[in-house]
Image (tube, rainbow, N blue to C red):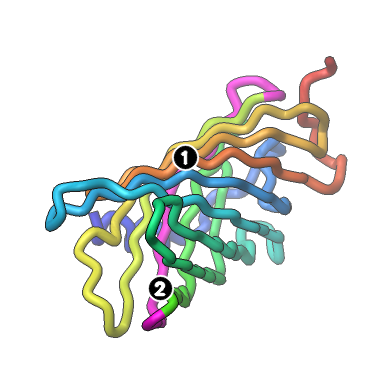
Amino acid sequence: MRPLLAVLTLMPAAVLAQETGVSYNYFGLGYSRIEVEDDVLNDSFDFVGYNVEGSVTVRDHFHLFGFITDGSDDEPGMNLDTLDIVAGVGTHFDPLERFSVFGRVGLVKSEADNGIDSLDDDGYYLEAGLRYMPVEWVEVRAGLSDVEFDDIDVEDGEAALFGADLYLTEVVALTLDYTKQDNADAVTLGVRFYPGKEIVRGRRW
């Protein structure tokens, strides 16, 4: 999976973009429920998280992106808080109308605190995926991501990403995202704001 991610992430944007409804200018807010499987204890634990995300186009085929996730456990007797921050640069191109391919590379900082001890580490983040709008008011997307830390050995840093947007207007969309890892599943509900109306998006309700 990692070689594929590296190739897609660093793929040159050699195809000229056509006019498309897919936009890399957005700001989003979300709420996540995360279930983590503990193989040692043979049990699962639930977490909740709030996240903020954003992206801005800086060139025809390049964009800056970032997101912050603030999580905490949802189990009686536990007190674990986590904070993940990712920021980086991405490349994208649109070989077909309303169809986009993208790759991203960034830096990640992660912190965890259980009230007694804390840890933090830095690393890098890779992501590659596809975005497609079958109609003007729906977007679907899929991709892969990988996280590698400097000190913490993360065996299950790879994840499969799936998502969808339902445009209420040209600017506002409801979002649903699902992330699958070897020992964790996350479902995120949120809203994205796409500023600018140079591209026709959204259903005329």
Q: In which quadrant of the rendered image does the C terminus lie?
A: top right
Q: Residues within 10 Å of mark 2 (few under 14, many from 20)?
A: some
Spatial CA distance of label 2 from label 1 is 23 Å
Residue 128 falls within the magenta-colored stretch: yes
Does label 2 or label 1 sit earlier along the sequence?
Answer: 2
Is residue 162 rendered to the left or right of residue 61? Answer: left
Residue 61 falls within the magenta-colored stretch: no
Please report the residue visible at 48 percent of the width from the left and 71 percent of the height from the top. 106
Q: Is residue 126 visible?
A: yes
Is residue 144 rendered to the left or right of residue 21? Answer: left
Please report the residue visible at 70 percent of the width from the left and 60 percent of the height from the top. 57
Is the residue 105 above or below the residue 44 in the image?
A: below
Please report the residue visible at 47 percent of the width from the left and 39 percent of the height from the top. 187
Q: Amino acid at mark 1?
A: Val
Residue 65 at x, y percent in the picture: 61, 63
Q: Secondary structure at mark 1?
A: strand
Closer to the observer: label 2 or label 1? 2
Q: Which residues are magenta?
A: 116-137
Q: Which residue is mark 2?
A: 114
Is residue 109 rendered to the left or right of residue 100? Answer: left
Give the main secondary structure of the magenta stretch.
strand
Q: Amino acid at mark 2?
A: Asn
Q: Which residue is mark 1?
A: 187
Q: Using the image as rendered, state which of residue 7 and residue 86 is in the foreground.
A: 86
